[in-house]
Structures are given as structure tokens and as C-alpha cells.
Image (cartoon, rainbow, N blue to C red):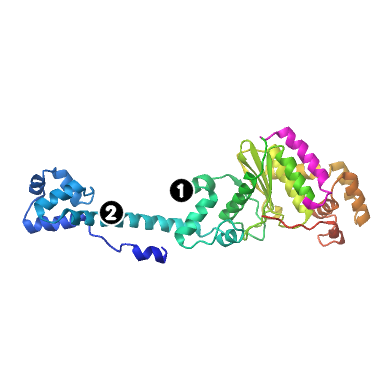
Amino acid sequence: MSKSAREWKLEYAIPPGLVLQEHLQARGYSQAEFARRCGRSPKLISEILAGKAPLEAKTALQFEKVLGLKAHVWMGIESQYRLFLIQEEEDKGMAAEMEWVKDFPIPELVKRECFSRPESDADRIARLLAFFRVASVDVWKTQYSKIKVDFRHSPSFRSEEKVIITWLRLGEIEAEQQNCVDYNRSQFRKAVQSIRNLTREPIDIALKQAEKLCNEAGVALALVRPLKKMALSGAAWWLSPRKAIIQLTARHKTDDHLWFSFFHEAAHILLHSKKCIFIEKNKKSAPDSEQESEANQWASNLLIPETAWKQIAQISSPSENVVREFAKEQGIAPGIVVGRLQHEKVIPWRSPLNSLKVHIVARG
């Protein structure tokens, strides 16, 4: 509870039933006799004494005539007591909501200008709910906490669920701004083939054109840099049955990782269920599921067909010229070839051929 909230919060309130009980005892009235004098039912008087029924204005006037205590005093006691009960209930709810809030990367959202710095605990909750476009914490839990996610974690970091969901929301916001047609699977297959050829273009130009081609097939392409405490490369999911999202972090900051992540996520869109959210992990952290293995194989074969791969993989130490020529023949960026050679352990991760990779920085 913030300081401003504590300044007006009632610390305690007297139930109207307790005041009524004292007056009845002072006059020697039984509940039944008092009910007769007021012209009300014994049940109502019993419920007021127990705090189960509220004291209404008409009843307060009757109490004034029988007991002599002014109606506005009765109503003031009733009003304060009901306000106190509501505040207690809100305090309980606030405690639960603050537990919900604490794992969200609020400082990063402020830094990214998603909203201004919250001024209080209640403001922190309100701004987060507005960010997710939900009316309450319960609605958020229904909409976001039960999503079926294929978490793909790095072995070095454990990505927190709320941080991942926040990152997905950032991608959702960007996707909402992209004007996509209804999803067309055949059109998206063609787009993916065209994007493969774009990998040789300057990265900014290629990504802009890739976004356009995806949008024309009903897929949003969002490049959103990772949040702290998450080590993910990308995700594939559906904003609606008619609009898919491929979301990338570019956390490795090289074109080979970026493009492989794109084609891996594209495979999920083309091959797998619309009900799942697929999030890319490092393979060393856990065995790949059947769907992840299928997406990996699909992306690998699309970028470098198996027959062509066997040709360059048999060269123990390919030179820069060999890699460049091979990449040109395949119509892909040379950095992609270098990345595949390293992944398959044909060459070491620390290699002079890393100079063929293009370094990139994610936006958003």
C-alpha cells in the first residue's frame, strides 16, 4: 500500500450492529420488542445486529424515533463500516496483485517507453494491465498464464515465464501495427523461398523486404531485442487464426543465427499446430522435441540442400574463397554457410571465417 493510500485508509470502524446492541441493552429491549416498535421483522433486526444486512436510510429514521439517536449518525456509522470492509477487501486483493507484479521487467518497459515510470504500487498494476490490454489480474492469468508454450531455454540462463510473456507482448504490439492479409499457406511458402534469396542483401534492406513478403502472406515479422533474464532467439505463434507472428531477438547479433531462427520459426508456421507457441532454445539445454527437430531439419535443408551440404562438408578446412563461392552458388549469405559448418563441427566456433558473418542489432 502506497503512502498516499495509507493517509486516508480507515484503521478501524464500528459495526452498526454493535452500536445497536449497546442501545438495546441500555433500554432493556429484546430484539423482538425492538422489531415490533420499529415495525420491522425480527429477521431484519437480527441480520443488522450480525452485520449481514446493511442499514438503510428508512431503517435509520425508524431507529431515530425509537432510540433517539439521529438518523444521520446511524448512516454515518453504516457508511464508515461498509467503506472499511471494502478497503480490507481491496488490501487483500492488492497483496495478491503485488505478488503478480513483482517478476515483470517494469524498469525495462519504462526504458523502452512502453509506459512512464509508475508512481505507486497501484499505478504499477494499472500500467501493466493497460500494457497487456486486460481489465484485471484474473483476466491476465486466464489469457496469458495458460498458453501452451514450447520453451526453448539457453543452458546458461533460465528464462522467466513472465519475462517471456512480456517479450511476446512486445512482439504482439509490433505485429498489430503491420498490415497483413489473411494467412495464405501457399503464399507464405513462396515468400519463404524469396526471403532465402534476400539473405545476400544488406541486412536492413533484407529484413524490410522480408517483412513485406511475410505481410503479403498473412504473417507478421517482428524483431524485438531480448529482455534481461531471457536467452531466446525467436518464437512462432498465432495472433489469430488468420494472422501468424514470427518474432526474433537477434541476440547472437550475427546474420547466420538470425536467418536460421527465421526459417526455423517459418517451419513451425507451415508445419505445426496453430494452438502452440514455439520458442527457440539452445539445443544443449534439453533434447529437442519431435516438432523442434523437424523445424531444425526443414530450415537446414531449405538453406543448404543435403546434396550441396555434403559437397562442402567433406572439405576439412574450407578457405574464405571456397565458402564465398559456395554461398554464391547456393544463393545465400556466406555467413549462413559458416554458421552451418560450425554447428556441424566442420570448423571451430573461433574461426577466421567469422569475418564473413554480418553483425546486426535488434530494434524495438
The residue indicated by pointer 1 is: 138
The residue lying at 17 percent from left, 57 percent from top is: 19
Mark 2–mark 1 CB contact (< 8 Å):
no
Estimate the x, y position of residue 290 in percent, counting from the top left.
68, 42
SS at circle 1: helix
The residue lying at 68 percent from left, 40 percent from top is: 219
**Which quarter of the rendered picture does the C terminus lie within?**
bottom right
| Residue type at tag 2 | Arg
SS at circle 2: helix
The residue lying at 46 percent from left, 49 percent from top is: 136
Question: Which disc is residue 129 wearing?
Answer: none
Residue 263 visible, this orientation: no
The residue lying at 13 percent from left, 52 percent from top is: 64
| Crowd band around label 2 with a 10 angstrom C-alpha radius: few (<14), some (14–19), many (20+) | some
| Residue type at tag 1 | Asp
- 285 relative position to 64: left or right: right
Q: Give residue 81's quadrant in the image.
A: bottom left
Q: Nearer the viewer, residue 4 or 203?
A: 4
Q: Which residues are magenta?
A: 182-204
- 54 relative position to 207: left or right: left
- 348 relative position to 219: left or right: right
Estimate the x, y position of residue 114 in percent, counting from the top left.
58, 56
Please say whether residue 191 is one of the residues in the magenta stretch: yes
The first of marks 2 and 1 along the sequence is 2
Question: Which disc is residue 82 wearing?
Answer: 2
**Which quarter of the rendered picture does the N terminus lie within?**
bottom left
Estimate the x, y position of residue 319 in percent, counting from the top left.
92, 56
